[in-house]
Image (cartoon, rainbow, N blue to C red):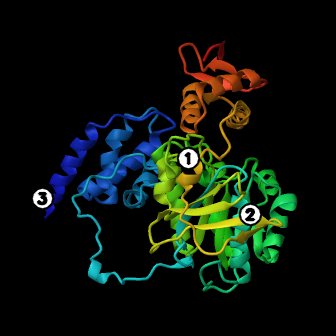
Amino acid sequence: MADDYAQRKARAVLYVSAVPGAAEGSRNAEGYSLAARIREKFDLTDSDLLDVLGGWNGRNIPPLDLDELAAVVKNADQYARNPAGSGWTGKKPATESSLPTIRLSDVQAKSVSWLYPNRYPNRAINLIAGQGATGKTTYSAHLMSCITTGKDFHDAANEFPPRQCLYFGEEDDLDTVLRPKLDAAGADVSRVVAFDYERFFASQGHGFNLAEHIKHLEKTIEEMKDCGAVFIDPLNGYLGAINSYSDNEARSVLIPLQNLAKKYNIAIFGLCHLSKKSDAAAIDRVLGSVAFVNAARSVHLITTDKETGLRFLTIEKANYSVDPTNLSFRIVDGAVAFADGITTKTADDILQAGRQKSDTTSQAVCWLRDKLKGGGVLSNDIRDQASHEGYSRYALEAAKLELKVVAKRDSFGGKWRLYLPGYAADTIEGVGV
């Protein structure tokens, strides 16, 4: 055994001899990394580890003093066990341990937990999509009315007592829009809690977004204690700086949000807009990456027959539902009034009939202004997103002219970005991008 230990120490000395010294500012981090590796590879005592590290320390510029080197050795185990966030910049040695698994005989089968039976599951993201002015927020107020009062849904029993709802809305005022809709729907407004954007901005210095502040959302749900649902209107407005058309970036936000729904057994509703691409299937017109539709367990579209004013609530995706049905409704005195029975109409029927609002230059102007309000955006990204959302190249170019959009390079040979007038940037100005 003694010979084996001596051989390990000799190999450790040889190992360290190949490690270059570190400059001031990185000596401690490099030392912790090296000490952790030696500890795990060769299992030396503290005194021998200190001795072995002496050769490496002699190559540092300048060397660590003896007390600093001893502190590195003393804490080597801590950094070897848990390098993440500890200051250890090295990698743990590769292991050949098997993957963690779960035997299905140890899993207890459970029924789906429904907020709204056969329509909106708990523990999931549910999308409600439609073009502007189709009634998405009014319909959401109807759902909040059922959740906060405990009354039955239109075509299903409400199996929960009255609970609270958390609402995020950046497009409509609380006093002139949301509160009147909730009152018209008969909601218990004392159980509806709305996110206060201004107070959050004042305390944090920036707006709320799901990419950075998911823990704030979880803390709020936890403190509410009886939260039944979260409404995010629109979902795309709270994603942060991610590219919503990138599957990977969209999932980086959606998966933590989905896990939150599972942890607290609640339904999360994301309200979404539709693109103007009239040649696409209805479900493919939900704005953003396909990850939004893929991550959701249910996707409902609200469309409007412009000739009759009748709205259609159609199920475009229903992972857990059995024979889901489509409904129709009107908005009477500011509230949802369902028509009797079910409808065979689909979202594609209404959208393909050309009765939804068409693409216009004025819409493109509003869209482009919103995209550029936070600063420069890559010209190629704007072009791709405009195409995805159904804006023609003519409409996009007309919008640029009307807004007097400025195109500038990041640097000589850099990428082109688009800016609204008034945004300063140390870039090279150009035209025709």
Report how far apart the C-alphas of labels 3 and 2 lie in the structure: 80 Å
Q: Is residue 213 above or below residue 10?
A: below
Q: Residue 138 location in percent, x, y?
A: 74, 63
Q: Quadrant of residue 404?
A: top right
Front tag of 3 and 2: 2
Kindly identify the residue that appears in the image at 78 percent across and 51 percent down.
201
The one nearer the camera, 25 or 139, is: 139
Q: Is residue 397 above or below residue 87?
A: above
Kindly identify the residue that appears in the image at 29 percent across and 51 percent down.
38
Circle 2 residue: 138
Q: Mark 3 or mark 1, which is nearer the start of the sequence?
A: 3
Report how far apart the C-alphas of labels 2 and 1 lie in the structure: 24 Å
Q: Quadrant of residue 394?
A: top right
Kindly identify the residue that appears in the image at 59 percent across and 81 percent down.
156
Q: What is the number of the mark on residue 352?
A: 1
Label 2: element kind:
helix
Side of 265 where 40 appears, left or right: left
Circle 3 residue: 3
Is residue 403 visible to us here?
A: yes
Side of 273 where 369 appears, left or right: right
Q: Mark 1 or mark 2, which is nearer the start of the sequence?
A: 2
